[in-house]
Structures are given as structure tokens and as C-alpha cells.
Amino acid sequence: MTENFKHKKTYEAKPQQPSSADEDTDLYADLPNVGYKRHQHMYSPLQTAILFDHFGNPETRAGN
């Protein structure tokens, strides 16, 4: 059975880079307090406000 798969490459898992939320303890500490779950794709208004406080509003950031 394994002879059929000899031509297939094997891949190893590579360590992932930590996300910016993992690196920033203030942000990572604040978001779970307002219901944030890791791998969340949509944010509540309160979570969005915390993100804007931390990173700044992208609409008012220089270069836009």
C-alpha cells in the first residue's frame, strides 16, 4: 500500500509566528474581558473600541 505513495512529498509542521495579540500583553489582557475569543472574525463595538485605542483608527491614520 505504501508503494503507491512513494512519489508524494511529506511536509513537517512549521512553528507559527505569534500573533500581535499574543505579543502585546495589554491588548491580550483587555480583549478577553469583553468576550473576545481567539480566532474570532467579527468584533463587538466594545472590542472594536479597544482595538482602535490600541492600534489607532485606520481612517485617521497618516497615509490614508
Image (cartoon, rainbow, N blue to C red):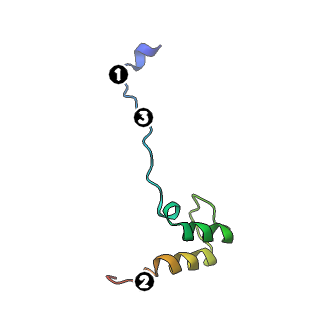
Q: Could you tell whether 21 is left or right of 33 in the image?
A: left
Going by the numbered disc 1, the residue's amino acid type is His
Task: Give the residue at mark 3.
Answer: 12
Q: Which of marks 3 and 2 is in front?
A: 3
Mark 3 vs mark 2, CA separation in Å: 40 Å
Could you tell me which secondary element the residue under label 2 belongs to? loop
Residue 22 locus on image (x, y percent)? 52, 60
Mark 3 vs mark 1, CA separation in Å: 16 Å
Q: Which mark is residue 7?
A: 1
* Residue found farthest to the front: 25
Mark 1 vs mark 2, CA separation in Å: 51 Å
Q: In this rendering, is residue 5 above or below 14? A: above
Give 18 or 44, whichever is nearer the viewer.
18
Q: Could you tell whether 38 is left or right of 8 in the image?
A: right
Q: Earlier in the sequence, mark 1 or mark 2?
A: 1
Q: Earlier in the sequence, mark 3 or mark 2?
A: 3
Q: In this rendering, is residue 42 above or below 5? A: below
Which residue sits at x=47%, y=13%?
A: 1
Task: Give the residue at mark 2.
Answer: 59
Please rate how many residues cluster around mark 3, counting C-alpha atoms within 10 Å: few if below 14, some from 14 to 19, many from 20: few
Residue 18 locus on image (x, y percent)? 47, 55
Residue 39 locus on image (x, y percent)? 57, 58
Please identify the quarter of the rendering in which residue 5 is found: top left
Is the C terminus in the top left, top right, bottom left or bottom right quadrant?
A: bottom left
Going by the numbered disc 2, the residue's amino acid type is Glu
Which residue sits at x=57%, y=80%?
A: 49
